[in-house]
Amino acid sequence: MSVNSISILTLLLVVTISAEDIQLVTTELGKDVSLHCTNRTWSEIMFETWKIRNTIGAECQIAVRFDQTDANSTCEDRITIQNTSENRPFLHVSHFNNADEGIYTCQSAYNGGMGKVQFNVSIIDNGTQPPAESGSRLVAILLAILAFIIIILITSFFFKRILLVVLRSCCNSAIPATISSNKQECEEFEPYEIYVEKMNYIYS
C-alpha cells in the first residue's frame, strides 16, 4: 500500500463529521444577533464558512481561514465574522431586519473533524410573546373559564335546592289551612242540610 493511500485512509478514520444541529433563534427588530458555530478557538479551527439563505430565497456566503485576517464575503457589511475575547469566531449581524430572517448554516473544519450547525433565525414583534409564554397564557385562560363554569354550576345547584325547600315549606303550610277551612264550611252547612232532610221527611 502506498504512502498516499495510507494517508487518505488515516484521514478518513480520523475525520468525523458531527450530526447536524438545528437551533431556533428569535430576536427583536433592529437588535444585533451573534451566532456561534463552535466553541473551539482558532488554534483548533482551520476554516469556518457561513451560508445564509433568507425567507425570500436570496443567498450570501462568508468564509474565513485560520491563516487569514479578512473574510471572503458576498454578504452585506452588517454581516461579519468576529472573535470573542477567547479567540472564538462567531457570526455577527448588526441591526437585524426582516430581510435577514432565514436559515444560517455554518460549517467548520478543525483538527480531527468537521462540524455543521443550522440556525433558523426569525423576528419577534414587541407585542408578540414567545410560543412557550403564549401557551402558558392560553392554559391559564382555559383554566379560568373552567373554574367559572364550575362555580356557575355549583351556584345553580344550591339555588335550586334552596328554591325547592322554600316551595315545600310554603305548600306544607298552605295545605292544613285549606283543610281546616273546608271543615269549617262543612260544619256551618251541616245544620241546614239536617233541617232540609227533616222537612222532606215530614211532608213525605
Image (cartoon, rainbow, N blue to C red):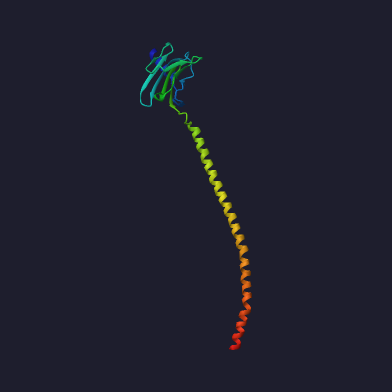
Image coordinates for residue 42, horizontal then vertical, percent: 47, 14
For the image, the number of numbered tags is: 0
Residue in the foreground of this view, choosing between 136 and 67:
136
- Above or below, comparing residue 142 to residue 196 in the picture: above
Image coordinates for residue 15, horizontal then vertical, percent: 43, 19
Would residue 144 be seen by someone viewing this image from the given angle? yes
Residue in the foreground of this view, choosing between 166 and 87:
166
Residue in the foreground of this view, choosing between 19 and 58:
58
> Residue at position x 39%, y 21% from top?
51
204 on left or right of 24:
right
Image coordinates for residue 17, horizontal then vertical, percent: 43, 22
Image coordinates for residue 44, horizontal then vertical, percent: 47, 15
> Residue at position x 60%, y 83% from top?
197
> Residue at position x 60%, y 86% from top?
201
- Above or below, comparing residue 131 to residue 100 in the picture: below
Residue in the foreground of this view, choosing between 11 and 18:
18
Q: Quadrant of residue 124?
A: top left
174 on left or right of 41:
right
Please identify the quadrant where the C terminus is shown.
bottom right
Please identify the quadrant where the N terminus is shown.
top left
Residue that lies at the very extreme toward the left in this rendered image: 57
Would residue 6 be seen by someone viewing this image from the given angle? no
